[in-house]
Image: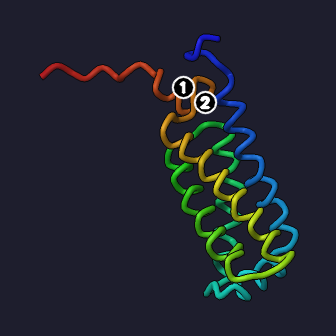
Amino acid sequence: MNESVSPLPALGRILLALIFVQAGISKLGTVASTTANMASHGIPYANILVWGAIALELVGGLMLMAGWLTRLLGFLFFLYVLTLGLVFHRYWEMTGAAARTQHAYFFQHLAIMGGMLYVMAFGAGPYSIDALIRRRPPVPQPAT
């Protein structure tokens, strides 16, 4: 398949973004419990930051699906998921079944981070808003 017109980057972006869009929608219905969970993990201003998390997951996820500001979103999601892994999934401090569960979640976060590194490195691909913007003909400049 010709890489320059492959739909695979778009499919990959959509699949990566689905987890964030779904999480953002879910948080909209559980703002109070999400805020309490954040606060229980020592996150200050959880009642305010919960809205930032929802915005990043929902709006950022939709933007990633569309391929708009893709490399920036890849970077932001990389940092976000790294933070989530280090704050919420500290399996090394646990034992037994809880440690195994959090270990699995932590390594799922690492896999998502790997996907975001690909997004940062290779961009959105041909079927994206980023690609449409790049194809726009330049505005002619007046001769001086």
- Outermost front residue: 96
Residue 34 at what x, y percent from top left? 79, 77
x 79%, y 60%: residue:
23
Kindly report the distance in space between the C-alpha atoms of the residues bearing marks 2 and 1: 6 Å
| Location of the N terminus (image quadrant) | top right
Packing grade of label 2 (10 A; few <14, some 14-19, many >=20) is: many
> Which is nearer the eye, 45 or 121?
121
Q: Secondary structure at mark 2?
A: loop
Relative to 46, say whether 108 is above or below. above
Relative to 106, say whether 139 is above or below. above
Packing grade of label 1 (10 A; few <14, some 14-19, many >=20) is: few
| Location of the C terminus (image quadrant) | top left
Residue 11 at what x, y percent from top left? 72, 31
Res 87 → quadrant: bottom right
* Three-letter residue code for mark 1: Leu
- Outermost left residue: 144
> Which is nearer the eye, 91 or 46?
91
Residue that carries the numbered disc 1 in the rendered image: 132
Q: Mark 2 touching mark 1, by CB under 8 A?
A: yes
**Left or right: where does residue 135 sit relative to residue 143?**
right
**Left or right: where does residue 138 sit relative to residue 24?**
left
Q: Secondary structure at mark 1?
A: helix
Residue that carries the numbered disc 2 in the rendered image: 128
Relative to 24, say whether 131 is above or below. above
* Three-letter residue code for mark 2: Ser
Res 132 → quadrant: top right
> Which is nearer the eye, 95 or 37?
95
x 77%, y 62%: residue:
104
